[in-house]
Image (tube, rainbow, N blue to C red):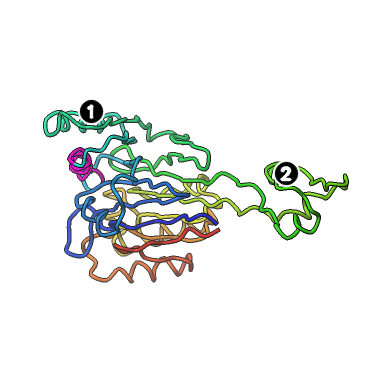
Amino acid sequence: MEPFVIHILGCGSALPTLRHYPAMQIVEIRGKQFMIDCGEGAQLQLRRHRIRFTRLSHVFISHQHGDHCLGLVGMISSFGLLDRTAPLHVYGVAELGDMVRRQLDFFCPHLSFELCWHDVDPTQHSVVYEDRSLTVETLPLCHTVPCCGYLFREKPTLAHIRPEMLRCYDIPMSQVNNIKAGADGLTPDGQVVSFSKLTLPPDPPRSYAYCSDTCYMPELHGLLRGVTTLYHEATYAADHIDNARKYKHSTAAQAATVARDAGVGQLLLGHYSQRYDDENVLLREAQQIFPNTMLTQEMQSIDVMA
């Protein structure tokens, strides 16, 4: 099975602390690396994770609050200093794109590569990126400014060939691609060997949903049905639910409720308020509703399992 890994660069919220960087991640899937959000310190965290700048080609920004995007211009500037030539694709709301372009015109007007800005409508659930192996969809969220999450879905793969069965029936390798696609095999003497004898089932597609800053949305679980791994902000514990309502954030219990109702495989918590010196209070609260919950921490690399 190809790697599908979430690298946690930061898991804090708006106010900086000595314990956490702002919320930002790298999604590594089938040899590609995608960044979600880009707060201050992004470049340092990429270095610490030993993620090569040249491998990063797409950045998805959830919204224009500073803790989710203030590291973007600095990172782009560094890419220019390294004489990058490959285009960098950035996805975000149009207003943020205008601001980023103005800053780049001022700080680094002669970039060595093309910045391709893709306007995202955070009110729509739509596919904003697609290649041969995956799609990325927007997830409309409810925050104090227009905001969306992102859902990474693997496309179904082909069946696995059983080499020992090919040898048993003396089936030529030239038939492998057709068999993977569902055809039966044919021996040199004309005998038909069924597809089911020659293959094993394909790996089940995996998916990862990143739900950035949002208040509790009872209807959100419908867009997340059956997701393999869900990251959902959990800024507060339930005893601060008034703050969650006021600032349009979620409690750990609310994040767990979304995960339970969606039937996801695993829940990751993040975007912790600076008030918590020990986030285990959030973990315990969530696990009472959805047991397969874990806290995210900087420098973690979490496998998305089928």
The three-letter code of the residue at mark 2 reads Gln
| Up/down of 221 relative to 292, above or below | above
Where is residue 52 drawn, in percent x and y?
30, 50
At mark 1, the secondary structure is: helix
Q: Nearer the viewer, residue 197 or 10?
A: 197
Q: List x then y, in percent, for residue 28.
A: 41, 51
Work out whether 93 lies above or below 139: above
The answer, for residue 48, to whether it is visible in the render is: yes
Residue 88, quarter of picture: top left
Q: Per the image, is 70 magenta?
A: yes
Q: Residue at x 39, y 71 (%)?
A: 284
Which residue is painted at 79% across and 45% down in the image?
A: 184
Please state the extent of the stretch shown in magenta in the rendering. 68-81
State the image coordinates of residue 36 (x, y, percent, origin top left).
34, 46
Predominant secondary structure, magenta span: helix
Q: CA distance from mark 1 to mark 2?
A: 52 Å
Q: Is residue 220 magenta?
A: no
> Please, what is the three-letter code of the amino acid marked with disc 1?
Asp
Name which residue lies at 27% across and 71% down: 278
